[in-house]
């Protein structure tokens, strides 16, 4: 016996597919405001690290050509470009780093440092963080039976310990899950799901880079 509700849902899905197939491609822009998502920062860092007071956070350097985009997602005939909006990607990631440290109980402050050992003694703090965004791009394509999402964020972070006269460099590369099946699920919000994936992937990169450098001998020492 045929299920009327299932038949109706399939018919609606096919109808929408036909409509999308007959429309011209539309391009829209969606702004993303980065915010840390994940385990509590204060649970990830050792007490000796959280005792750091003078932590300088330098604005991250974005080495990409297009510095205000996170990537694109195509759903039917709609192409969505995810952008940083009023703040640059660099500004957003720098803010996330400072928020992460603050929520861990530390006291970060904006400052200057070029990431080099010869300028480390001149920083106005006991420690400094310098970072570079080498890659940050996501792409995806959604259909009724599946959603494919790919992407990568690669960050190089440097942790300078002025007292020890040492710099620890850590490269973190994070990729998201690239496929999510949702057979004829008309309620699936492709645009929001892609935005959520970008935010969570960036958060993971920030979390892994900071916690990794703090575990090093130079990062753990005062």
Image (cartoon, rainbow, N blue to C red):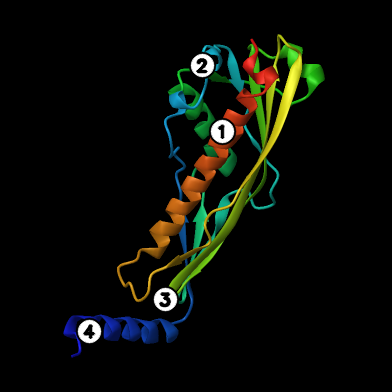
**Precedes in sequence: disc 4 or disc 2:** 4
**Residue 16 at x, y percent in the picture:** 34, 81
The residue carrying mark 2 is 50
The residue carrying mark 3 is 145
**Precedes in sequence: disc 3 or disc 1:** 1
Task: Give the mark toward the camera: 1 or 2.
Answer: 2
The residue carrying mark 4 is 8
Callout 1: helix, strand or loop?
helix
User: Residue shown at 50%/34% (left/top)?
Assistant: 96
Mark 4 surroundings: few (<14), some (14-19) or many (≥20) residues within 10 A: few
Q: Mark 4–mark 2 contact, CB under 8 Å?
A: no
Q: Gap between marks 4 and 3, in whole Å? A: 17 Å
Q: Gap between marks 3 and 1, in whole Å? A: 38 Å
Q: Which mark is residue 94?
A: 1
Q: Which mark is residue 53?
A: none
Q: Gap between marks 1 and 2, in whole Å? A: 19 Å
The reply to whether residue 85 is in sight is no
**Residue 55 at x, y percent in the picture:** 58, 17
Q: Gap between marks 2 and 3, in whole Å? A: 47 Å
User: Residue shown at 28%/86% (left/top)?
Assistant: 11
**Residue 152 at x, y percent in the picture:** 61, 52
Mark 1 surroundings: few (<14), some (14-19) or many (≥20) residues within 10 A: many
Considering every residue shown, the one lying at the far bottom of the view is 1
**Residue 144 at x, y percent in the picture:** 40, 76
Picture quarter with the N terminus: bottom left
Callout 4: helix, strand or loop?
helix
**Precedes in sequence: disc 4 or disc 3:** 4
């Amino acid at each position: 016996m045929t299920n009327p509700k299932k038949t109706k849902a399939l018919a609606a899905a096919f109808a929408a597919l036909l409509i999308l197939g007959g429309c011209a491609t539309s391009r829209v822009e969606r702004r993303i405001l980065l915010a840390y998502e994940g385990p509590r920062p204060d649970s990830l860092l050792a007490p000796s690290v959280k005792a750091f007071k003078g932590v300088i956070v330098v604005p991250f350097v974005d080495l990409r050509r297009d510095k205000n985009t996170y990537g694109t997602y195509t759903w039917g005939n709609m192409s969505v470009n995810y952008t940083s909006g009023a703040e640059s990607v660099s500004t957003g990631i720098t803010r996330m780093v400072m928020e992460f440290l603050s929520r861990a109980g530390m006291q970060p402050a904006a400052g200057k440092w070029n990431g080099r050992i010869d300028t480390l003694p001149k920083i106005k703090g006991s420690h400094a963080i310098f970072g570079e965004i080498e890659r940050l791009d996501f792409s995806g394509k959604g259909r009724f039976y599946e959603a494919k999402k790919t992407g990568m964020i690669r960050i190089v972070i440097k942790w300078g310990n002025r007292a020890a006269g040492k710099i620890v460099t850590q490269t973190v590369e994070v990729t998201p899950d690239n496929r999510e099946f949702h057979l004829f699920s008309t309620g699936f919000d492709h645009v929001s799901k892609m935005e959520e994936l970008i935010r969570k992937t960036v958060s993971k990169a920030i979390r892994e880079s900071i916690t990794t450098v703090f575990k090093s001998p130079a990062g753990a020492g005062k």
